[in-house]
Amino acid sequence: MEWAWLIPVFSFAAAPLIVVLGRVLPGSGSFLAILAIAAGFAMFWWVFAGFLGAGAGTENCLVSSHTGTLTCHYQMAWFHAGLAGAAGSVALTWGIIVDPLTLAMLGLVTFVALMVQIYSLGYMRGDSRFGWYYAVHAMFAAAMLTLVLADNFLLLYVAWELVGICSYLLIGFWHERPAAKEAAKKAFIVTRIGDVGMLIGILLIWREVGTFSMFDAFEAVSSGAMSEGVTTVAALLLFLGAMGKSAQFPFHVWLPDAMEGPTPVSALIHAATMVVAGVFLVARVYPIFSAYDGDALLVVAIVGLITALMASTIALVSVDLKRILAYSTISHLGLMMLSLGAFGYTAAIFHLLAHGFAKALLFLGAGSVMHGTDELDIRKMGGLRKVMPMTAFLFSLGALSLGGIPILSGFWSKDEILLAVNEHLNPAFIILALLTAFLSAMYMARAMFVPFFGNLRQEMEHAHESPASMIGPMALLGVLAAVFGFVSFNWPGSYQGIGSFLFFHEAEGFHFNWWLGILSIILAVGAFILGYLVYIKDRVSLEGFRARLGSLIPVVENKYYFDEAYQWAVDRVVLVFANFIGLFDRIVINDLAVNGPANSVHRLGVAMRLHVTGHVYSYAMGMVLGTIALSIFWWFRSVS
Amino acid sequence: MVDLVYFQLLSAALFVIGMYGVLARRSAVLIVMSIELMLNAVNINLIAAASHLGYRSVGEAFTNFDGQIIAIFVITVAAAELGLALAIILRIYRNRGSVNVDEVDLMKW
């Protein structure tokens, strides 16, 4: 288990190798990335087995008093900033944590990254930068794996930013297209805004605790060394970073635009490597969030709920298949945040995993559709079931799972979230959460029925099924999207459900609230039936409904004008302010403060050089006068 | 013995004449000659003072040679300096065809 740090190292090593040797290796070196992540995946199982066999007595392992779960901690000294032992010196360490949360993330990231990389063999075939794609891909996975293993905020932050830069490179992979370039910049800048808050939060904790170690921070919080105010502020600042990465309101605008990247990249970003980093961060530092009755968690819950509700309404009116999925991701990330805010630690991570598998499947399905039809506008699709049967089946499976149809994994995880919300938060939250659940089933029904069912459109007849390298990974993901939910049950034997493995302080068994469960089944199934009637049978017309909503529809269709508002803010506030600062810099700093002294010295020199005539006798005169002056001076001095 | 003050007056007069020459003359050669005059005025002053100090009390041996020694140094340095100065003046003449110091004003901005 102490070798868990090797998991990211494989991929970290693969990335530069592909860049350097890509030209001479077969397949541009793509197999290196796949082998590296496959090694990471195998390693994950080894670590997992080691962890299951470990107990509180195992070396370096103990039952953490901060999370209540078995936590193994391995670290090595890195260097001292400042003199060792001197006041203000910081001992920096590399270190990894292996605990249930890390293991869950390791499994998700390695598996999804492996599937996506195999899929990309088919999808990216023939691209001129095939090797570069795999190099960045490997780096992306490695950064995310480092992030989930990190035991201190510094390493976490480094990995966090690496994830950011890799997503920038991949979203802008086809940088010849202006839209991709803009989307990459947008993703990077918007997430950076949140990251600044996160950095301040980390520094605030460092100021209070004196180290970057997470365990020291948890200790300071639980012992009361960090006061309530500081803890809450630190938690909220860290949450800013999580909001940026996890595309929470109001930072959600970058995620839909990130669709400009290659579709497998979207799958990776949405399911495993990028956006779940925010949810993971909140879960990782949960002792800080939940301290002092969890004041910060209420903010998390509210932001999550707003995000979930807003994004699911936009998803309902989008016409681009990938954008529907993007808003769906935002909405589900909102649900995870809501769950974390409702003390539903297990539910949030469980949903993260279930959503990860289903969403990776859906994106790979969308990529397959795009591969076969070169089209993403669902209004132009229809009946693809007949030409792409496997894709249609697997996509539907993912959609049903995410929509919350019983026995598929999304149903169980969503149910856990609803339970947590019902237990810990105001009734208003559960009503809105149920509304979100209904809406998410509704847009999933739309994304599934409109392109794949109904009559085959004439312009879609040329469509073809994708190669096995693309269908294979989708099938594996499909199996997990279907049955992964079963890990939440009490199985015969000692297994007590995921809640007994991955929990915060209190292990929870599987529980099921009948009225809530039945309500969510009715909502989900009802949404899919309604979707079937509306989009396929045309039995129910939405025109009356649309007419009643009236002017609200364009507002939603324009994504609540967030982009416009931000553009206005950038143009009218940021740029005006920047111009002012620019003028200030040019006039006050540059002309007055920097060039001012230089100019005055120059002018002084111009004035002074007039006495240098170059005539020997004027210098001699100066000597004589100086001597006389000195003589008079000494004369008076000796007299007095 | 002639009183010391007359030597000093002679020395001062020669020094001031030399100084006037340095300041007022335009020819580099004359300036150098004026400098020699000033140096010799100083020498007179030194020798006179030294000979007076050497015989402070009548009958004693002449013991204090400081003034004479410095005067010999001055003469030596003056000779060297004169050689150097004349060499410079010669080079200026070769370059400019004149030894008028008004025309030699390169040492300015």
Image (tube, coloured by chain):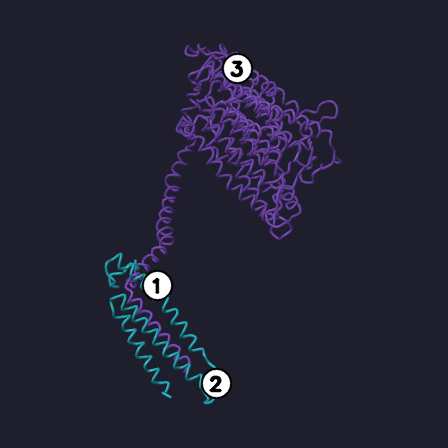
Q: Position of residue A308 (x, y in %)?
A: 52, 31
Disc nearest the viewer among 2 and 3: 2
Number of the label disc, if any, that sits on residue B84: 1
Chain letter for cyan?
Answer: B
Number of the label disc, if any, that sits on residue B61: 2
Q: Amino acid at mark 3?
A: Thr
Cα distance, mark 2 to mark 3? 130 Å
| Outermost residue to the right | A57
Residue A431 seen in render: no
| Chain under callout 1 | B
Horizontally, is A154 left or right of A50 in the view? left
Q: Quadrant of residue A399?
A: top right
**Element carrying mark 2:** loop
| Chain under callout 2 | B
Does B96 appear above or below A273?
below
- Do the residues at discs 2 and 3 belong to one chain? no
Q: Position of residue A194 (x, y in %)?
A: 50, 39
Cβ–Cβ below 8 Å for labels 2 and 3? no
Q: Specify the colour of chain A.
A: purple
Count the marks.
3
Cα distance, mark 1 to mark 2? 40 Å
| Chain under callout 3 | A
Does A394 appear above or below A275?
above
Does A208 appear above or below A64?
below
Q: Amino acid at mark 2?
A: Ala
Q: Quadrant of the N terminus of chain A?
A: top right
- Going from N to C along the chain, the mark reached first, 1 or 2, is 2
Q: Amino acid at mark 1?
A: Leu
Q: Quadrant of residue A616?
A: bottom left
Cα distance, mark 3 to mark 1? 103 Å
Mark 2 surroundings: few (<14), some (14-19) or many (≥20) residues within 10 A: few
